[in-house]
Image (tube, rainbow, N blue to C red):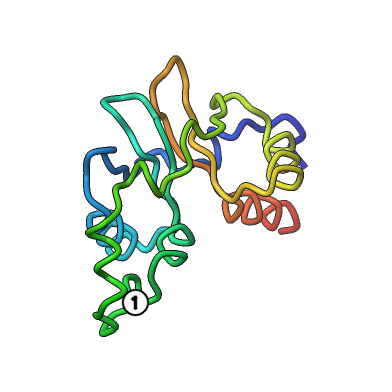
Amino acid sequence: MKKREPISHIMTKTVVTVNQNDDLRKVVEKLKSNSIRHLPVVNGKEVVGIISRTDINRLTFGALFDGQDGMDEAILDMLTIPQVMTSKPKTLPSDTIIKDLASIFVKEEFHALPVVDNGELKGIVTTTDVIKYFLEQYD
């Protein structure tokens, strides 16, 4: 097993983001169209939050499921991204060791963290990335 592997080797480098001024319908559309569960929220290049599929599901059951239009979606028009997102999320530099990341995920119960170097978003790393990495170690 590679003991000092940095998260830059497992993170997603092409990150789908939303702007803090976008509406929640755009969040739903990006989550669905990209088959992802977490979106960093940016203001310019700065990461100001993170919003997840779970955050949206807490608001409405129908928004993320096709053919489930209805009153629940009105919530998406009533709230803003800053009202729903996790503000000032923990971020990590790309040279963080994967083992350290795994410890953070276990202790703090995060499922995704933005990777930021010198104030600029460089990627996102998820629990799925870590599990895939550890599974590869058994091959």
Q: Which of 74 and 116 is in front in this view?
A: 74
Above or below, 20 against 135 in this view is: above
Above or below, 67 against 130 in this view is: below
Q: What element carries label 1?
A: loop
- Residue 128 at x, y percent in the picture: 58, 56
| Residue at 42 percent of width and 18 percent of height | 119
- Residue 105 at x, y percent in the picture: 68, 45
* Residue annotated with mark 1: 62
Q: Is 32 left, or right, of 12 in this rendering? A: left
| Residue at 25 percent of width and 80 percent of height | 70
| Neighbour tally class for label 1: few under 14, some 14-19, many 20 plus, Cα within 10 Å | some
Q: Is 136 left, or right, of 84 in this rendering? A: right
Q: Nearer the viewer, residue 75 or 49?
A: 75
- Residue 67 at x, y percent in the picture: 26, 85
| Residue at 26 percent of width and 77 percent of height | 71
Query: What amino acid type is highlighted by mark number 1?
Result: Gly
Q: Is 67 left, or right, of 103 in this rendering? A: left
Q: Is 43 left, or right, of 124 in this rendering? A: left
The quarter of the image holding the C terminus is: bottom right
Above or below, 121 against 124 in this view is: above
Residue 5: which quarter of the image? top right
